[in-house]
Image (tube, rainbow, N blue to C red):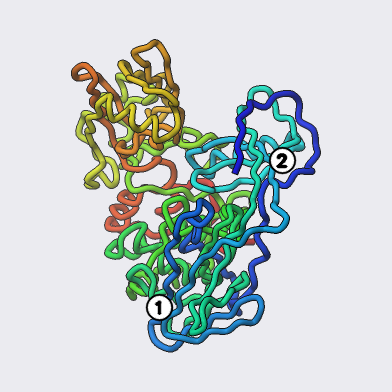
Amino acid sequence: MHFSNQVCTANPRKVKSFATHDAPSKTPSISLEKNVLLVGIQPYLGKEIINDNNSPSLRLISNGRNLILKDANGVIRKAQEINIGWRAKELLNPKVFVRKTIGPFASFESAERLANDLKKQGIESTIAHPLDWEVWVSGDIELPLSMKSTYQKIKVAKTVLPYLYGNNGKIALKGPISLKAPDGLRWKKGIYLGPFSIQSDAYGSWTLVEHVPIERYLHGVVPYEIGASSPEAALAAQAVLARTWALANRHRFKVDGYNLCSDTQCQVYKDPSKVNQKIKRAIKKTAGKILTWNNKPINTVYHATNGGVMASVDEAWSIKQVPYLQVRVDGPKQWTRTVDLPLSNENNLKSFLYSKSEAFGSDHPLFRWEKTIESSQISKQLNQAKKVSSPFYPNKIKVVTRGSSGRVTSLKINGKTGSEIFLKLDDIRRVFRQLPSTLFVVKEIKEGKWLFSGGGFGHGAGMSQSGAIELAKNGWTTKQILSHYYPKTKYGFLP
């Protein structure tokens, strides 16, 4: 692969002649059920082959009756265990992709905001996730002066192909491949019912995808996101949010031919077989119900604990404000009246963080926290996040701006050589991974050592899970919890 760097300038034009990537073949419809989500449970299979390294084989083990594998050429294999290996095949006619890459972005939300801005200017783009979130634009499109991008000309001379181990050597497989598991597939200490497909992505590698009906998908989300022992009203609220989120985000991995991933870049989805009766009841009780605003599924972001104050959505990501995600103190009325706002005022914030709190969910272990970070750690993390290209020695950290909820929206780090780095919104926690939230104050406690004192775990917008658990214990209904955290939204079936 050949990469050359160039900052792109000038005015946009509406043309698209260069392909930016290899478009994966269409995913087969292999499930007969309704409202099926395609969830990538193992991405980037075979990617090591691209760089001439060995790649681990894909080991598929049945939980009972034989697995049934079928490829696009009709090759069928029935077995208790199926192993798929990966090999490189040289292309007679190498493919060339030319693109301008913008990013990396700390989240899909920030990448999508930019893609939408480009769309308004008549520029088509693709949101991709080769490792981090990126936006790809055709190589011949001129971008606005202010937009930094990397010009990439990528020559692909080989392709990664799957094969089966047979008695007489390797049996080549052609994708997409379908896989049925009548009694479930054993995967990462769990059991997944499928059916599944093994399909190519936009980066030359492959993904194992489960085709799962949305209500069954929730079996693998709700217990891991809020905890299986939560009260039923809180579990039901989480089910509504997870269902709404999945519907609103079905386009997240469109470039790779599936809907959602299974890690924290989406909602955590794992071992659905561990679901208990209480969670099944909560899911069934709310079956098909979501939150809408203007007849569309809302952006149901949620988090572990908000530290006593809800964030506006634009304090977390570079996206537009919405009326249902606004700054509010999260607790009983008589206590919220005693809190001095706005918390963008440092004195108000310190008083809020250091005084006794009656906020909902204040028993969460990260409701209040302290973290000490040294300059060597900061240098390393800035490097890992590709924020610096040469050694950088921080000597000053300063909060530049805060949102009304007190969350840091811009942070300045000064280097000893006079250089400075600005981190904004979700990029702050992408670099400072040890910080549970951006609701903090910072002070230098000795040279090269800073103390971050803060509250909450997560971005702070939408439902606080620890808050919902407390409200459910206090007798609030699912509907009351949802309208508390997402005011002005409608609770019901998708119109």
Instruction: Name the one closer to the observer, 292 or 387.
Output: 387
Residue that extends furthest to the bottom in the rendered view of this protein: 65
At 60% across and 37% down in the image, what residue appears? 3
Q: Nearer the viewer, residue 207 or 123?
A: 207
Q: What residue type is labelled 1?
A: Ile
Residue 495, compared with residue 78, is above or below; it is above
Q: Quick one: label 2 or label 1, which is nearer the N terminus?
A: 1
Q: Locate the N terminus by quadrant.
A: top right
How would you rate the neighbour count of disc 1 (Cα within 10 Å): few for under 14, some for 14-19, many for 20 or more? some
- In the rendered image, residue 418, in percent from the top left (x then y), is placed at 39, 10
* Pointer 2 with pointer 1, Cβ within 8 A: no
Give coordinates of residue 364: x percent, y percent. 24, 47
Q: Which of 39 and 162 is in front in this view?
A: 162
| Real-space Cα separation, disc 2 to disc 1, in angstroms | 41 Å
| Placement of the C terminus among the 4 image quadrants | bottom right
For disc 1, the marked residue is: 61
Query: Can the viewer see residue 403?
Result: no
Name the residue: 56% across, 77% down. 171
Q: Quadrant of residue 33?
A: bottom right
In which quarter of the view is residue 235 placed?
bottom left
Residue 68's x, y, as percent? 52, 84
Numbered disc 2: secondary structure: strand
- Categorize mark 2 by other alpha carbons within 10 Å: few (<14), some (14-19), many (20+): many
The disc placed on residue 138 is 2
